[in-house]
Amino acid sequence: MSPVVQLQKNRFGMSSKTSKVGVIGAGNVGANVANALVLLGKCVKVVLFDRTLSKAEGQAWDIEDTIPLLKEMEIIASDRYEDLADSDVIVVTVGVQQKEGQSRLDILSDNAEIMRSTIKELDRVAPNSIVLIVSNPVDVLTRIAIANSTRAENLIFGSGTVLDTARLRYQLGKQLNVNKQDVRVYVIGEHGDSEFVVWSSAFIGGIPLAEFPIPQGATLEQIQQKYAELTRKRGYNISERKGNTSYGISTVVSQLVDTILRDEKEIFPVSVRADSNYGIGSEVVLGLPCIISSQGIERQLVLPRNADEQRLLEESATELNEAYNSLDS
């Protein structure tokens, strides 16, 4: 029986299954993901896996020291894939990290083989777990994971443009002086340089953005240009100043894990193979809005878009397809 089914029964008092989340990679992102899961109390057990056991131990022990001040949890360091068995969700963060001046696609060739071998091991020890890919370039690596896995496709997806969308909603909310929860707009496409904002479907508290009162001294076009650019460059700007990004993505992962474990059916723009109604083929993987539940991808949604946005989506898909196909050259 899959962990997901057991969790569903647990909500009706029919099973004592506890929530277990595996994190592969004890580097900057993986350690911060594990820490966020513990700090926010998103599950009962976290397994932090790394090929170098001492590295996983150092991170896990440091996080473990916070548990007496929080809710009771368990964090385990491991270098054995077998310890990930029966995980409800496994978060994959392993790979070569971006260096200054590199795009996410620049590190693809180094990370593709790592992803193939990781997925093979996960299929062996945890074939029913939901796998969440965070490693960059996340869209192409998610496509590689899907192509090389034997598990159902709804059980594999990437973090996509969830962080980009969160960045945009927060900054746009500040500009318009409204709570970010009332800002409903999506960044879709590549988690990278070809991502774009679907402004035509943007709403503020149920009011189309095009009809929402704009602060004096600004125009809608200026706001759209400013915040699309800010969102696209935000990760690079952070990395230039501190060397990496970690807090934002770790919180994104914690929220996605929580949505899965609680079967909340929340909508996030995650990395998935595009629905045929997007008109970009059925193989390319990129950030698109989906309902996330205890089944992983419960349903993909087709976001309305205008002609310019369709063109941008096609350009993003072309770039990602070229990157994926370059691995065979």
Image (tube, rainbow, N blue to C red):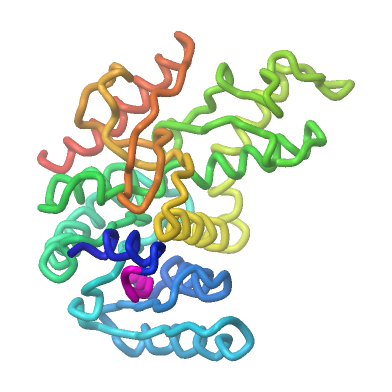
Left of 221 or right of it: where is 33? left
- Check the picture and name the quadrant holding the N terminus: bottom left
Question: Hey, which quadrant is residue 190 in on the image?
Answer: top left
Q: Residue furthest top?
A: 307
Question: Hey, which quadrant is residue 261 in on the image?
Answer: bottom left
In reply to whether residue 22 is colored magenta, the answer given is yes
Q: Residue furthest front?
A: 13
Residue beneath the point at 35% across and 56% down: 135
Residue beneath the point at 41% across and 56% down: 98
Residue beneath the point at 39% across and 22% down: 313
Q: Determine whether 264 is above or below 75 in the image.
A: above
Identify which residue, 119 or 82, lies in the foreground: 82
- Check the picture and name the quadrant holding the C terminus: top left
Q: Determine whether 24 is above or below 108 in the image.
A: below
Please provide percent x and percent y for residue 298: 33, 41
In reply to whether residue 78 is colored magenta, the answer given is no
Please provide percent x and percent y for residue 271: 35, 41
Residue beneath the point at 12% across and 51% down: 148
Left of 329 or right of it: where is 167? right
Q: Main secondary structure of the magenta part?
A: loop
The magenta segment is: 14-23
Q: Residue furthest right?
A: 216
